[in-house]
Amino acid sequence: MSSFTHMALATRLQRPLSSLLPYPFADANAEDAGAGAGTKEYVHIRVQQRNGRKSLTTVQGLKKEYSYTKILKDLKKEFCCNGTVVQDSELGQVIQLQGDQRKNVSTFLVQAGLVKKDNIKIHGF
C-alpha cells in the first residue's frame, strides 16, 4: 500500500495513521512484558552505602509464595546481623540487612534451594 492509501484509509476510519502501520518494536515489548517463553525472574542483591563504613544489603525479587519473615529470621541468625522486611509500592517486599552481606545471602539462597545460582544478580561496588 502506498502512503496515500494509508492516509485515505486513516481519515475514513477516523484513526491516526500510526495505528495502521506495524509497530517496529512490538516483539521487544512482548519480551519485556514477560510474554517470551524463556523469561527468568531474577533475585537482585544490592548494597547501599550509608554513613562512613556502614552499609545496607537489600534482597528483592523472591517469589511471593515465600514467607519473607522466616527467610529474614534465618538470615539474621546465620549472619549475626539485624534486618527488616520493607513493603515498597513498586518493588513489593524487600529484605534489608545490616552490613555488606551480598555473597553470604547469595550462597544462603542457593544452599537453601530457594533460588538457582543462575537467577541471582549481585549489584554494587
Image (tube, rainbow, N blue to C red):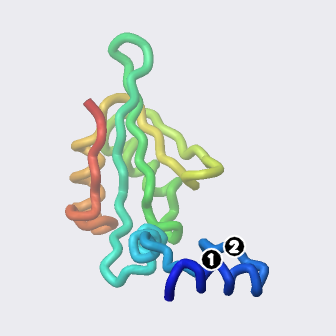
Q: Where is residue 35 shown, x and y percent of the image? A: 44, 80
Quickly name the residue at label 1: 19
Residue at image position (36%, 51%) is: 44
Residue 86 in percent (x, y) is at 58, 44
Residue at mark 2 = 16
| Separation of marks 1 and 2 at Cα, in angstroms | 6 Å
> Of helix, strand and loop, which one carries label 1?
helix
Q: Is residue 123 visible?
A: yes
Examine the rendered structure and indicate whether residue 32 appears above or below residue 123: below
- Say which mark, if any, is on residue 91: none
Q: 9 or 20, which lies in front?
A: 9
* Residue 38 position within the rendered picture, expressed as x and y whole percent measured from the top left: 30, 79
Residue 117 is left or right of residue 4, and the answer is left
Identify which amino acid the numbered label 1 is placed on: Ser
Closer to us: 10 or 27: 10
**Relative to residue 3, is residue 42 depicted above or below?**
above
Q: Amino acid at mark 2?
A: Pro
The answer to the question of whether label 1 and label 2 lie on touching residues, with beta carbons closer than 8 A, is: yes
> Which residue is rendered at x = 30% and y = 47% of the image?
105
Location of the C terminus (image quadrant):
top left
User: Image quarter for residue 7?
Assistant: bottom right
